[in-house]
Image (tube, helix red, strand yellow):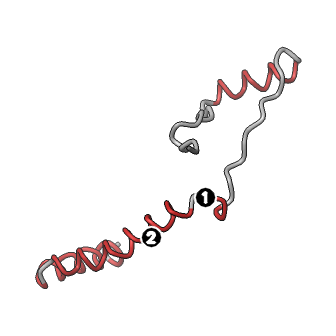
Amino acid sequence: MTERSSKRKKRDHDFSVIAHRVVQEATGETEPQQVEPEPPPEERHAAAVTLGRLGGKKGGPARAKKLSKKRRSEIAKKAAQARWGR
């Protein structure tokens, strides 16, 4: 089974941690760390990609069918106000 991205070791984003690592590598205290690049989109699991698209294709039309005409109108007005009301 392939390793999920959420299970992979996350990179540090704290400036002080990164600076400390850079100083250690520059002074030779530790070896430089290699960061594994993310696989290109064509190498992702095809079934997961298909499943994700399937849900996305169903979701919008199913939600629109469930909403009443009045509620859809309210949502559209709110969206237009947010977009153009500034």
Residue 24: x, y in percent? 80, 19
Q: CA distance from mark 1 to mark 2?
A: 13 Å
Residue 11: x, y in percent? 62, 35
Q: The residue tagged with tag 2: helix, strand or loop?
A: helix
With respect to residue 59, does 7 lie above or below?
above
Q: Looking at the image, is mark 1 or mark 2 earlier in the sequence?
A: 1
Query: Based on the displayed image, in which of its 4 quarters is residue 85 positioned?
Result: bottom left
Identify the amino acid type marked 1: Arg
> In percent of the image, x 23 and y 79: which residue is there?
64
Instruction: Please say if the residues under marks 1 and 2 sit with CB atoms less than 8 Å apart.
Output: no
Disc ID at residue 44: 1
Identify the image quadrant of the C terminus.
Answer: bottom left
Q: Which residue is mark 2?
A: 53
**Badge 1 density bin: few <14, some 14–19, many ≥20, Cα 10 Å:** few
Residue 35 placement, left or right of 46? right
> In percent of the image, x 88 and y 18: which residue is there?
28
Identify the image quadrant of the N terminus.
Answer: top right
> In percent of the image, x 48 and y 68: which residue is there?
50
Residue 45: x, y in percent? 57, 58
Q: Residue furthest top?
A: 29
Given residues 59 and 51, the one toward you in this image is 51
Residue 7: x, y in percent? 53, 37
Given residues 26 and 64, the one toward you in this image is 64
> In percent of the image, x 57 and y 42: which residue is there?
3
Residue 32 placement, left or right of 14? right
Query: Based on the displayed image, in which of its 4 quarters is residue 19 positioned?
Result: top right
